[in-house]
Image (cartoon, grey):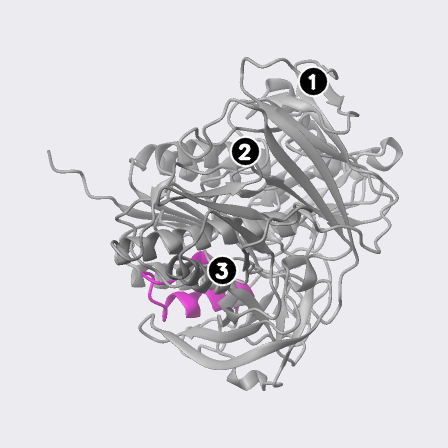
């Protein structure tokens, strides 16, 4: 039976307001851009009321079939409001009421709230990705900040006039007082009492949908004057205008959403624009596809300060003397190399380069790809080798990824990995953990196969080296006046793990409790025994914003008392065949500014196949986005180690 072809469908919603003149133009721009990418099934609703948004989303879910490619776009205002009494109760930002502001929002009353909440949107998104995981959400609004999308010249906030008579004065969007705030409070409380969405929303964030957001959680999104003289409109959303231009000229076959985010961030902006466009979810996906590109080594380039900087700095393992080539995309998706450079000086969140390059040479979407390392990232111990041919082949491959080979035993145990050769069979070890099974390694008899295996071993060793580097990050000058606490998720709540190295069971869930005394950003990583590096704090992939005295719990959705936590799973036995408890490391990185550290994420060591194509060396310490690098970030790093036993193993004494 012939498979049914997938449909490219899109839902575009616009909610104009008195101070937003470009929403209709945004819808036109997105329609044109999506048609460039063969979207024929496009539904537009503008102006969109609350009922319009609800019915259109329900229809989108109903129409979507497995394999469909889906885009959901919203242009308009967004809002958050502080729950009544939140400051006195010490309630944090994660419990604020957040919602889209439909066109009929001014008709809201205490008994008829017209906002469309983030809880409702999350539930619809979960239903949608259950039918087809190929979903992209684009939000040109500030639905998480106090300041909503504005024109550059008008910084006054629009007031909402209530339709019923009242002795209360009209309130602004974000004021946590008056009838408007009580209406939001009542509606959210109704959702909570109904248990709305508790069984459908992911613990941290939807792992399937790519989300392109016009602002950070507490930032701004702007309208900007339109430069298209024949469009008939005077303004458009700054992100939408840049996105339209990017989508109209790129090749989707070679472009990821990470690339799109880079291009938008590097679009020339007028003075006053300080919005931070972010890409959440599986941001390494190619446009409108499920396939991802693992960018092992591409570092973002930032030119917002008028100089060329590499983003990530010491927190992304950039080091003085590392050499990069600056790469951009040509009109047909081909790579174009603009220049070569060397890391000159490294701060915590950015690096300067030499020679100094003019920003006019940096094309939109440029990234820096490593071509050599200034210093070794670690050593790999050799055991059982006698042939110079074998040694030279491995040395060339492993040296290309910044590692060195050592023939002498390492009594201090500082080597990140060990290569053992016995009976012409090669195996890679991390400590006592042997990866996969021994594979034949005879360069004289099987030169092509030996090169394939050597390349696979080199990349596996580099992944181990990166995991080792992240695990050894420490210290920092930031004083958040708090100690993050690792906890086990139990049916009756959280149980703090006070043991130095607790033992958990495969499938158990953990949480991390963070209660800072100042505003910070937090990234929580898990380093798996197979060298996989996973970002656990996915609610805001570029660093969860935590307000002073707020209590953040990893794996707890907004306004839910229940903490779901994050499940830990042992790697496949086909990679690490052992019944012994396996070591896991949880890293917590706190910074005083936005520093996107998703560059650390990587797949673990994979099984080797003789059919693997021979590829050039790949690297892995790129950083996506981040704050303007001229303002360096203070940081503090915390490390937690634990063991994960099989499901039938006894639990830790802390149980």
Instruction: Classify residue 583 by image quadrant.
Output: top right
Q: In the displayed structure, would residue 394 be above or below residue 373?
A: above
Quick one: label 3 or label 1, which is nearer the N terminus?
A: 3
- Viewer-proximal residue, 551 or 61? 551
Viewer can see residue 601: no
Q: Which residues are magenta?
A: 236-257
Q: Which residue bears the numbered disc 3? A: 619
Label 3: which secondary element: loop
Quick one: label 1 or label 2, which is nearer the N terminus?
A: 2
Q: What is the residue that sits farthest to the front in this orientation?
A: 386
Pinpoint residue 556: horizontal percent, then vertical percent: 66, 30
Q: Give how far apart the Cα atoms at labels 1 and 2 are.
A: 39 Å
Q: What is the residue that sits farthest to the left in this orientation?
A: 1
- Please report contact status of discs 2 and 3: CB closer than 8 Å, yes or no: no
Q: Which residue bears the numbered disc 2? A: 120
Q: Residue at x 35, y 37 (%)?
A: 132
Quick one: label 2 or label 3, which is nearer the N terminus?
A: 2
Instruction: Classify residue 511 by image quadrant.
Output: top right
Label 1 neighbourhood size at 10 Å, few (<14), some (14-19), many (20+)?
some
Q: Which residue bears the numbered disc 1? A: 652
- Viewer-proximal residue, 580 or 584? 580
């Amino acid at each position: 039976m012939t498979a049914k072809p997938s449909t490219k469908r899109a839902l575009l919603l616009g909610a104009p307001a008195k101070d937003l003149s470009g929403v209709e133009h945004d819808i036109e721009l997105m329609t044109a851009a999506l048609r460039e990418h063969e979207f024929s099934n496009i539904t537009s609703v503008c102006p969109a009321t609350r009922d319009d948004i609800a019915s259109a989303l329900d229809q989108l879910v109903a129409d979507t079939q497995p394999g469909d490619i889906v885009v959901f776009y919203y242009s308009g205002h967004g809002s958050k409001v502080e729950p009544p009494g939140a400051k006195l109760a010490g309630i944090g930002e994660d419990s604020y009421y957040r919602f889209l502001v439909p066109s009929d929002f001014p008709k809201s009353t205490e008994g008829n709230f017209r906002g469309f909440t983030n809880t409702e949107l999350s539930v619809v998104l979960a239903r949608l990705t259950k039918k087809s995981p190929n979903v992209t959400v684009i939000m040109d609004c500030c639905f998480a900040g106090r300041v909503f999308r504005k024109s550059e010249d008008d910084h006054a906030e629009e007031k909402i006039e209530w339709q019923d008579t009242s002795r209360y004065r009209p309130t602004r969007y974000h004021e946590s007082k008056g009838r408007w705030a009580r209406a939001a409070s009542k509606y959210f409380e109704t959702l909570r009492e109904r248990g709305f969405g508790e069984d459908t929303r992911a613990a941290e964030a939807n792992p399937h949908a790519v989300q392109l957001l016009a602002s950070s959680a507490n930032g701004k999104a702007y309208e900007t004057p339109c430069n298209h003289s024949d469009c008939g409109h005077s303004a458009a959303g700054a992100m939408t205008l840049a996105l339209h231009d990017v989508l109209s000229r790129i090749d989707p076959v070679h472009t990821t959403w990470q690339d799109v985010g880079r291009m938008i961030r590097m679009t020339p902006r007028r003075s006053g624009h300080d919005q931070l466009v972010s890409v959440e979810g599986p941001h390494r996906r190619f446009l409108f596809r499920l396939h991802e590109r693992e960018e092992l080594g591409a570092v973002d380039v930032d030119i917002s300060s008028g100089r060329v900087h590499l983003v990530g700095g010491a927190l992304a393992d950039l080091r003085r003397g590392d050499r990069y080539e600056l790469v951009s995309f040509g009109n047909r998706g081909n790579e174009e190399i603009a220049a070569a450079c060397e890391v000159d000086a490294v701060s915590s969140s950015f690096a300067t380069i030499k020679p100094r390059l003019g920003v006019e040479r940096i094309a939109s979407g440029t990234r820096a790809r490593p071509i050599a390392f200034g210093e070794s990232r670690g050593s790999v111990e050799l055991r059982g080798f006698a042939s110079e041919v074998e040694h030279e082949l491995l040395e060339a491959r492993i040296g290309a990824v910044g590692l060195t080979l050592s023939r002498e035993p390492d009594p201090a145990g500082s080597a990140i990995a060990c290569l053992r050769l016995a009976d012409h069979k090669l195996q890679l070890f991390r400590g006592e953990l042997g990866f996969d099974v021994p594979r034949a390694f005879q360069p004289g008899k099987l030169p092509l196969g030996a090169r394939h295996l050597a390349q696979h071993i080199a990349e596996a060793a580099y992944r181990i080296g990166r995991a080792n580097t992240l695990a050894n990050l420490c210290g920092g000058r930031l004083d958040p006046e708090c100690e993050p606490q690792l906890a086990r998720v139990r049916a009756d709540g959280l149980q703090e793990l006070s043991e130095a190295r607790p033992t958990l069971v495969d499938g158990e869930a953990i949480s991390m409790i963070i209660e800072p005394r100042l505003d910070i950003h937090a990234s929580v990583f898990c380093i798996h025994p197979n060298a996989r590096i996973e970002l656990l704090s996915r609610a805001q992939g570029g660093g969860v914003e935590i307000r002073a005295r707020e209590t953040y719990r990893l794996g707890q959705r907004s306004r839910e008392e229940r903490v779901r936590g994050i499940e830990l799973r042992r790697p496949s036995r086909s990679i690490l065949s052992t019944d012994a408890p396996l070591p896991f490391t949880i890293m917590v990185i706190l910074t005083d500014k936005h520093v996107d550290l998703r560059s650390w994420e990587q797949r673990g060591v994979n099984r080797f196949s003789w059919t693997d194509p021979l590829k050039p060396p790949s690297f892995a310490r790129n950083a996506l986005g981040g704050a303007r690098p001229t303002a360096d970030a203070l940081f503090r790093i915390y490390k937690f180690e634990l063991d994960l036993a099989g499901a039938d193993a006894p639990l830790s004494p802390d149980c």
